[in-house]
Amino acid sequence: MRLIFAKKLGFCSGVKRAISLAQSIPKRNNKKGTVTNPVHTLGPLIHNPQEVERLEKRGVKAISRLNQIKTGTLIVPSHGLPRSILKKIEKKRLKLIDATCPFVKRAQLLAKSLHNRGYHVVIVGQKSHPEVISLLSFANGDASVVETPVDVDKLKTTKKIGVISQTTQSVEKFEKIVERLKTKVKKLKIHNTICKETSQRQKEAKGLAEKSDLMIVIGGKNSANTARLYEICKKVTRAHHMESPAELRLYSFNKKGVVGITSGTSTPDWIIRSVVKGLHKTQPG
Ligand code: SF4
């Protein structure tokens, strides 16, 4: 088996920033050993369960509702939060650390500015994704989420539209949706807000898949950008999406094949290393 690797593996700049912000908060304990400055994130800081678990052991805990905490530090996750929640946080006596990725922030500000200028905002993305929920709130709810080109035909408004994207969408899908919008709307403002790191990885994954008998895409099952990479790879060759090395035993591996390795932007290096180590072990002799 020959392994070939994507040039860009592991954390992207936005995830690195979020993790370093979370880790920079010193833990303070009282005499009984209780942490006196608990650190929380509303929802997971990043979409990788194993890394979130590692952070939890270091005192950074994910909560699902704001009323679960009264004091301490709250970190805004890399994919952002809705405006209504941000306002509620301001009213509480919490120290806020904003780890929203700058690329997500840019998309939020564009949603706000398009709405303020009278555009109906169309977000290309996954309706249930926290980033999309946050983008909707920045457009004051006057926005539509479009998941496929077919959804464009269901749009009620044909007034001027401003289109943006969830930062981790597929470039190909965004372009197809924009083409469809062009046939429906007279005034269309296009902002491709897919982040550079996502589009580079998608391009690279396709190239790597073309040279591989099998692609292994490593990353959280809840990670949107990892799911996109997997979709891209499986259109070209056989592909497996794995969150951890434990999943290696579900498959058999050809001794002579070429295996391409890529990862989502929230996959830590330590998981990539352990999957690669596990792959070598599947090749006795
Ligand atoms: S994938 Fe892109 S938008 Fe998401 S955290 Fe990384 S750099 Fe930011």
Image (cartoon, rainbow, N blue to C red):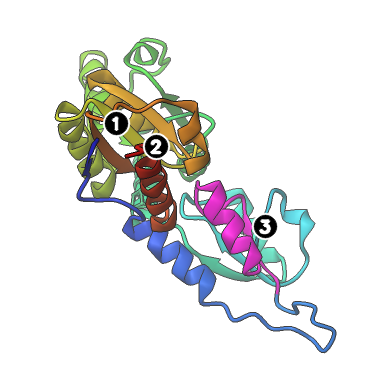
Work out whether mark 3 precedes mark 2 in sequence or the reverse, and give the earlier one. Answer: 3
Q: Nearer the viewer, residue 260 or 183?
A: 260
Residue in the picture at 35% in, 36% down? 217
Instruction: Please state which amino acid type lies under the numbered disc 1.
Output: Met
**Does mark 3's beta carbon lie closer than 8 Å to ligand 1?**
no
Mark 1 and mark 3: span between their CA atoms?
44 Å
- The residue sitting at the right extreme is 32
Can you identify the residue that label 3 sits on? 88
Residue 268 falls left or right of residue 209: right
Q: Looking at the image, do the residues carrying marks 1 and 2 touch, with CB atoms under 8 Å apart?
A: no
Q: Secondary structure at mark 1?
A: strand
Image quarter of residue 73: bottom right
Q: Position of residue 93 (x, y in %)?
A: 72, 71
Q: Which residues are magenta?
A: 38-59
Query: How would you rate the neighbour count of disc 1 (Cα within 10 Å): few for under 14, some for 14-19, many for 20 or more?
Result: many
Can you identify the residue that label 2 sits on? 282
Q: Secondary structure at mark 2?
A: loop
Residue 23 falls left or right of residue 29: left
In the rendered structure, find residue 178 and report the number of the disc placed on it. Answer: none
Q: Position of residue 89 (x, y in %)?
A: 65, 61
Between disc 1 and disc 3, the foreground one is: 1
Q: Looking at the image, do the residues carrying marks 3 and 2 touch, with CB atoms under 8 Å apart?
A: no
In the rendered structure, find residue 215 and report the number of the disc placed on it. Answer: 1
Mark 3 and mark 2: span between their CA atoms?
51 Å
Instruction: Please state which amino acid type lies under the numbered disc 3.
Output: Lys
Work out whether mark 1 precedes mark 3 in sequence or the reverse, and give the earlier one. Answer: 3
Q: Nearer the viewer, residue 195 or 221?
A: 221
**Magenta-colored stretch includes residue 47:** yes
Instruction: Please state which amino acid type lies under the numbered disc 2.
Output: Thr
**In the rendered image of this protein, does residue 107 appear above or below residue 180?**
below
**In the rendered image of this protein, does residue 63 appear above or below residue 181?**
below
